[in-house]
Image (tube, rainbow, N blue to C red):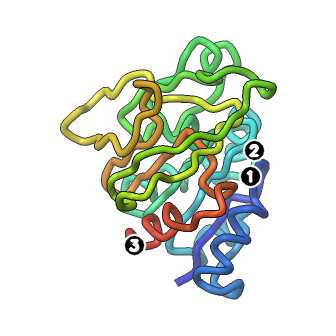
């Protein structure tokens, strides 16, 4: 089964590199249109600029199909901007830009919750589904889950400084940080276990 990385904008090559090491380059496809989306069994929405990603999902006629697939149980991982794209609700920045959200995660997100680009940092995170060894979270203009809207559906996987930074809702997995930049493939392996 091929794993797709949404290829409209953002940290595409970094995810492709990690996945290629884990499943082989022949099993990784950069997805830019509906035809390519139909060739994969799971999708990663990378970090980048979430408003741009949203607009390009619509422009490339991917938005409705990704949303439908997510509702049907198709595994999707969203990192950083991908978390924002997957959310049901956004903050005032999301409203101001008119960003369309996929609404697949019953959460409200806050953009740039840890500051701007100059405030980027790395920190050890405890993520129980990955084992006892801390995972290095790479935070770049990172969002956070401001509120879980349905506690019966959404499982919180990790917090940092009391801010929710990783969640799972069935087939949907999302992080505020960039696991593809950590040098640690455990988060990608966890996602692959869902496929």
Question: How many numbered circles does the render carry?
Answer: 3
Q: Closer to the camera, 72 or 9?
A: 9
Q: Closer to the camera, 103 or 116?
A: 116
Q: Which of marks 3 and 2 precedes in the sequence?
A: 2
Q: Residue at x 33, y 48 (%)?
A: 169
Which quadrant of the figure contains the C terminus?
bottom left
Cα gap from disc 2 to disc 1, whole angstroms = 6 Å
Q: Closer to the camera, 48 or 39?
A: 48
Residue picked out by circle 1 = 60
| Element assignment for label 3 | helix
| Element assignment for label 2 | helix
**Where's residue 78, x and y in %?**
55, 49
Residue picked out by circle 3 = 193
**Where's residue 24, x and y in %?**
65, 86
CB contact under 8 Å: marks 2 and 1 = yes
Cα gap from disc 2 to disc 3, whole angstroms = 29 Å
Cα gap from disc 3 to disc 1, whole angstroms = 29 Å
Q: Which of marks 1 and 3 precedes in the sequence?
A: 1
Q: Residue at x 39, y 41 (%)?
A: 158
Marker disc for residue 56: 2
Disc 2 crowd, CA 10 A, few/some/many (<14, 14-19, 20+): some
**Where's residue 37, x and y in %?**
62, 67
């Amino acid at each position: 089964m091929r794993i797709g990385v949404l290829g409209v904008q953002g940290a595409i090559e970094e995810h492709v590199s990690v996945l290629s090491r884990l499943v082989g380059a022949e099993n990784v496809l950069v997805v830019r249109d509906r035809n390519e989306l139909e060739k994969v069994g799971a999708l990663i929405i990378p970090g980048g600029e979430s408003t741009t990603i949203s607009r390009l999902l619509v422009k490339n006629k991917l938005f409705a199909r990704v949303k439908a697939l997510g509702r049907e149980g198709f595994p999707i991982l969203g990192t950083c901007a991908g978390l924002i794209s997957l959310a049901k609700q956004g903050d005032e920045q999301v409203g101001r830009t008119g960003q369309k959200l996929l609404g697949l995660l019953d959460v409200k997100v806050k953009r740039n919750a840890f500051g701007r680009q100059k405030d980027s940092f790395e920190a050890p995170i405890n993520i129980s589904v990955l084992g006892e060894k801390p995972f290095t979270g790479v935070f770049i203009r990172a969002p956070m889950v401001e509120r879980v809207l349905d506690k019966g559906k959404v499982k919180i996987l990790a917090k940092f400084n009391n801010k929710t930074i990783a969640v799972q809702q069935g087939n949907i997995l999302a992080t505020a940080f960039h696991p593809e930049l950590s040098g640690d493939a455990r988060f990608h392996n966890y996602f692959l276990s869902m496929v």
